[in-house]
Image (cartoon, rainbow, N blue to C red):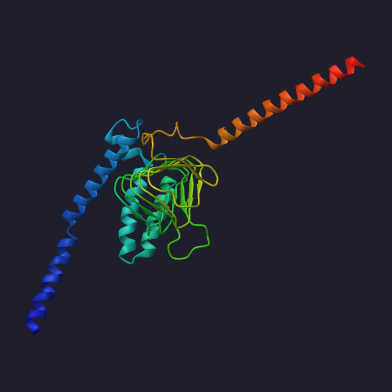
Amino acid sequence: MATVDISTSISDLIEKIASFSPVRAVCEIKKEIKDNIVAIRQRDPAAKSDVEVLLLYSGLHAILAYRVSHKLYLGGHTFSARAVSQAAKLLTGIEIHPGATIGKGLVIDHGTGVVIGETTEIGDNCTLYQGVTLGGTGKDVGKRHPTLGDNVLVGAGAKVLGPIVIDSNSKIAANAVVLKDIPENSTAVGIPARIARQGGRKVDDLDQIHIPDPVAQEITKLEQRIDELSRELAEIKEAKQEKNAKR
């Protein structure tokens, strides 16, 4: 019986050593870097070469630092994990909590001011622009931050707050504040965000031009109302002048 236990322990030890093989780790890191560079070049027309992306893109640097801090976090080394994430924040202007769960192919474009909270979950092939916050409301415990499905785009300055779900293939317009779940294949705009489009015509992943602008829409409504009031006022003045002329 003791022999079986010893052999089992040795087998477990060998398996653990193999799983932490430096060669395997290096291969994983190389693949991670390659996949991220490909994703950035596909979604950012400004990226001219792999070398440029590797050396100069802060979004890529922040994601790679996150991968290191996340492994430390899962291993129980929470202080070291936070040290890595805070160092990355100082270097890149992007704050990703090591406890967040992030899938493959995330692109953080420009990146300055991006904040990703501890219990955030991000699916595959998502895109975040500068100033995005995936944060909490301060009212929740446990799961406090958003969940993003696959292929989600979050525009510049948008805030997605609380343990809500942004389902796959959805888009959050620039400066929107999202406080409720957004179903798949939807476009959310405004403060608080509302669904402006669901299904229907497809919008390219990088196309934020054709997303309705709620501020512009309200200005248009105000201009139309001003025109109506101006016409009514002109009619009143004309009627008053005619009345005075008859006297």
Residue 219 point in image, percent of width and height: 61, 32
Which of 158 and 5 lies nearest the eye of the viewer?
158
Measured along the vertical axis of the image, is residue 221 above or below residue 130?
above
Q: Quadrant of residue 6?
A: bottom left
At x 8%, y 80%, the residue is: 4
Residue drawn at (57%, 36%), measured in percent from left and top?
215
Going by the picture, which residue comes out furthest to the right?
Answer: 247
Which quadrant does the C terminus fall into?
top right
Q: How many marks?
A: 0
Image quarter where the N terminus lies is: bottom left
Query: What residue appears at the point 35 percent right and 38 percent down from the top-left corner?
Result: 56
Q: In front here: 220 or 63?
A: 220
- Residue furthest bottom in the image: 1
Q: Is residue 228 above or below residue 197?
A: above
Q: Quadrant of residue 74?
A: bottom left
Residue 187 drawn at (x, y percent):
44, 41
Across and down, in percent, residue 233 comes to 76, 25
Q: In front: 242, or 145?
A: 242
Q: Nearer the viewer, residue 227 or 58?
A: 227
